[in-house]
Amino acid sequence: MRFKKIISVALALVVLLLSLLVFQLFQKTQLVMFETISFNMPLESFEKVFGKPNEIVEETETGYHNPWHARDPYLYKTGRLFYHYENFKWKSYSGRVTFTFSESHRLQGASVYFPVASKAQQKEIFYQMTKDMKAEIEALPDYQSMTTDTVGLYDDGYRYKVKLKGQMRELWIDVYPTEYEDEDNPENNQYNIRIDQSRW
């Protein structure tokens, strides 16, 4: 009897821990810059709020009919989706945004690209944008605390690791400059400020 009682208690604890883990995995967390959108939001609910995208891309990966020798490659669909939107606006900035959905079609993350005219303008806007982003993070309804790391090819960007009340996973927001420079055709140079959001 005593052994059965111990087993019952142990099973109850396992079920409780699994329930808490599932709750944390599927807990909704608001995205910064998007007040009505949350992580783990189902695709159907997302479309009702944000509307239809300009483009939908389904992720594909390479598989092999003979995996031991990496022979006979073929492409297969993973189920992940990328929703691309043009003409996205945040404060005084304009750009484009891509939302990533998991294999089960729940919102996993977002990447925003703000184009700028020159490297000098990029530096100026980046400084102001990081200030705006910090203010936006601190205004989250469940904001608790934040730490900052450097990111980017030259450590010229910032990663904000945000702790939220009642949640084990952190909200990570990367803000960093990106550039494409064509030495032969400088008129093709492209400068952006990119913002990525994910949960860890």
Image: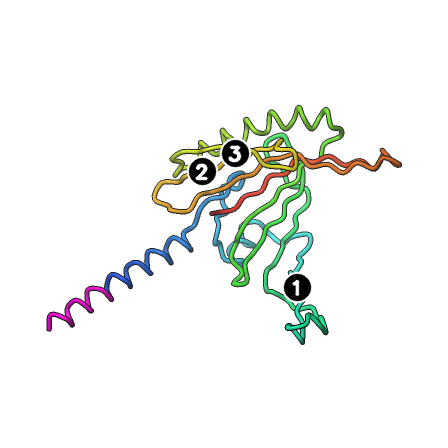
Residues packed near mark 2 inside 10 Å, few (<14), some (14 to 19) or many (20 plus): many
Which residues are the magenta region? 1-11
Q: Distance between the residues labelled 3 and 1?
A: 31 Å
Q: In this view, does 22 lie above or below 149?
A: below
Q: Name the residue at the bottom extreme.
A: 65
Magenta span has 6? yes
Question: Which amino acid lies under the numbered mark 3 shown in the image of this protein?
Answer: Asp
Mark closer to the chain start, 3 or 1 = 1
SS for callout 3: strand
Q: Name the residue under label 3.
A: 149
Out of 42 and 5, give the one closest to the viewer. 5
Q: In which quarter of the image is the N terminus?
A: bottom left
Left or right: where does residue 154 sit relative to residue 31? right
Q: Residue at x 54, y 43 (%)?
A: 197
Q: Residue at x 38, y 53 (%)?
A: 24
Left or right: where does residue 21 sit relative to residue 130? left
Mark closer to the chain start, 2 or 1 = 1
Out of 121 and 34, give the one closest to the viewer. 121
Question: Which amino acid lies under the numbered mark 2 shown in the image of this protein?
Answer: Val
Question: Which amino acid lies under the numbered mark 1 shown in the image of this protein?
Answer: Glu
Q: Name the residue under label 1.
A: 61
Where residue 174 sits in the image (x, y, percent)? 56, 38
Q: Mark 2 points at which residue?
A: 162
